[in-house]
Image (cartoon, rainbow, N blue to C red):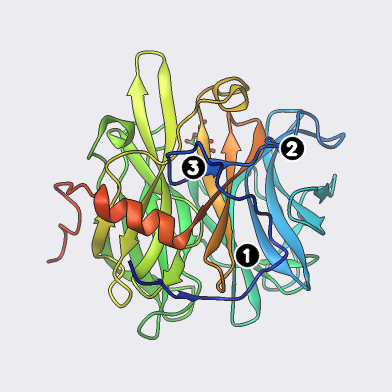
Amino acid sequence: MSEIKVSGINIPNMPWQNKPADCSKPIWRYTQNPITDWNPTPKCARIFNSAAIPWNGRFAGVFRADHINGVPQLHVGFSDDAIHWKFEDEEIRFVDENGNAYQPNYAYDPRVVEIDGVVYVVWCTDFSGPVLGIARTTDFKTFVRMENITTPYNRNGVLFPRKINGNYVILTRPSDNGHTAFGDIFISESPDLVYWGKHRKVMSAGGGWWQGLKIGAGPIPIETSEGWLLFYHGVSGTCNGYVYSLGAALLDLDEPSKVLYRTGNYLLTPEMPYETTGFVPNVCFPCASLCDAETGRIAIYYGAADTYTALAFTTVNETIEYMKKNHVNVGGDNSVWR
Ligand code: BMA
């Protein structure tokens, strides 16, 4: 296969380990996993489902921390190597557009992206139930809360890293206010990050039992010459509870509501003790990735068992090549508004 080009920045100092010789899968785990442990700060019981980006030659992130009262909030962290993190013990204190303090009742599963020099955080916030909140920052100190993106209920909001055909674009996952037993991925556009419309359905649950119950977008999509590379979570509803695995899809560059390929097999599923044992067993929940444009190397950050932060590696070529050989057609994909 010819070399696939990545549109993005070079991150030569990102975490990386070569694929082990005996690994037959397209994704392999960091050998020192997990990279966070129980009680990472006095206030925080567990840090997981979190998002990191390159920042001034180092790395910065917004981390989901479940506090020792059980309530999740978002915390800032910094790192030299994107593996060892220094977390702030105090949660992010948001302000609104007028500078007035705003604190969500809870905040979880952040995704972070820099677009035209502004860093945006999209997370699951409370607005008569879970919805998608968004805030912007330029210094990881002041976070300005903007208008909520959706009405109740919605989770897993993932912005694309640039405007497409003149509009901001976001993937979302309409849900209910509990442990939602359904869920497909939708897409919406906005000229200004305030007014959202032109809604389309992108992908439905299904196409293998590991993603049969519900799916949700994970890290910010990676722009490649073949399409947008999207990692997502797929959920299986077992008699012993939900199991969260990781899959990938390739979306059309100009019309990202179109699925070009989608993995029929999971790429990563709970197998290691830190994935199968913890606060919520059997969860691999990806929320961020770093991709080095020059080499196509990818480091995926995923929450493990709602307890730990873990890392896994792949390359753009490896994942897309695998996806082309292991593609599944799911009834309901690309199905609405066509
Ligand atoms: C989902 C979200 C995630 C969590 C997962 C497994 O509904 O709440 O934050 O990791 O459940 O508990």
* Mark 3 secondary-structure assignment: loop
Name the disc covering residue 36, or none.
2
* Mark 2 secondary-structure assignment: loop
Count the labels in the image. 3
On the image, numbered disc 3 is attached to which residue? 129
93 to 164, vertically: above or below? above
136 to 117, vertically: above or below? above
Q: Does the closest atom of ligand 1 sit within 8 Å of the Cβ of label 2?
A: no
Residue at image location 38% in from the left, 67% down from the top: 228
75 relative to 320 in the view: left or right: right
The mark nearer the N terminus, 3 or 2, is 2
The amino acid beneath tag 3 is Gly
Query: Would you call the spot at circle 1 few (<14 residues within 10 Å), some (14-19), or many (20 or more)?
Result: many
Query: Would you call the spot at circle 3 few (<14 residues within 10 Å), some (14-19), or many (20 or more)?
Result: some
Name the disc covering residue 284, or none.
none
On the image, numbered disc 1 is attached to which residue? 135
C-alpha gap between disc 3 and disc 2: 29 Å
Residue 316's x, y, as percent?
A: 45, 61
Residue 40's x, y, as percent?
A: 81, 36
Residue at image location 57% in from the left, 25% down from the top: 272
The picture quadrant where one finds residue 181 is top left
Residue 211's x, y, as percent?
A: 31, 36
- Depth order, front residue of 272/75: 272
Residue at image location 27% in from the left, 42% down from the top: 264
Q: Nearer the viewer, mark 1 or mark 3?
A: 1
- Depth order, front residue of 72/297: 297
